[in-house]
Amino acid sequence: MRIDDKFKFDLNRLNDTSAKKKGGEKSASSGSSDSASGDQVSLSSVAKDVAGMKEGLKGAPEIRVELVQELKVRIENGQYNVSGRDVAEKNRTDCD
């Protein structure tokens, strides 16, 4: 699965906000009753979708073990050949 840079940026912003919120909750809980004045935060549907994706990805492995094993076998057997042209083309399209 490929996650576009936009979603990476949104996830980073969400993580930063999450970390700040956790740090702020500790100080707010020990503060006075003035903090209960009704401050509200609303998230856009995109932020909610990103948060849902983030939760869904927590249990997913970062490495596709099956693919790695298949590639190791192909490399060991001398069956894995990649042309320099293919690598350059892939790098070029990733930069666009």
Image (cartoon, rainbow, N blue to C red):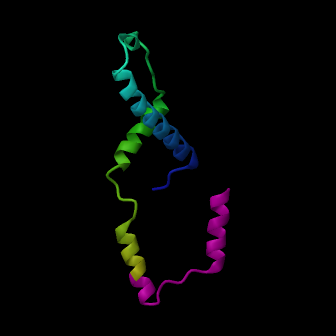
Answer with the quarter of the image where residue 95 lies. bottom right
Q: Quadrant of the N terminus?
A: bottom left
In the image, the segment drawn in magenta is 73-96
Residue 17 forms part of the magenta stretch: no
Q: Residue furthest bottom?
A: 78
Seen in the image, is 47 located left or right of residue 33? Answer: right
Pick the quarter of the image with the C terminus. bottom right
Say which residue appears at 42% left-offset and 28% top-offset. Answer: 24
At horizontal 46% and vertical 87% (from top left) the residue drawn is: 79
Can you tell which quarter of the image residue 63 is in?
bottom left
Exactly how many numbered labels are in the figure?
A: 0
Residue 86 magenta: yes
Give percent across and percent down for residue 30.
34, 21
Front position in the image: 35 or 54 = 35
Q: Is residue 70 above or below residue 29?
A: below
Closest to the observer: 58 or 90?
A: 58
Is the residue 35 above or below the residue 84 in the image?
A: above
Per the picture, the main secondary structure of the magenta-coloured stretch is: helix
Looking at the image, residue 87 lies above or below residue 45: below
Residue 22 in the image, given as x and y percentages of width and height: 39, 33
Residue 71: percent from the left, percent from the top? Answer: 42, 78
* Residue drawn at point x = 66 percent, y = 77 percent: 85
Towards the viewer: 82 or 18: 18
The residue nearer to you, when weighing 17 against 62, is 17
* Residue 26 on image: x %, y %: 36, 28
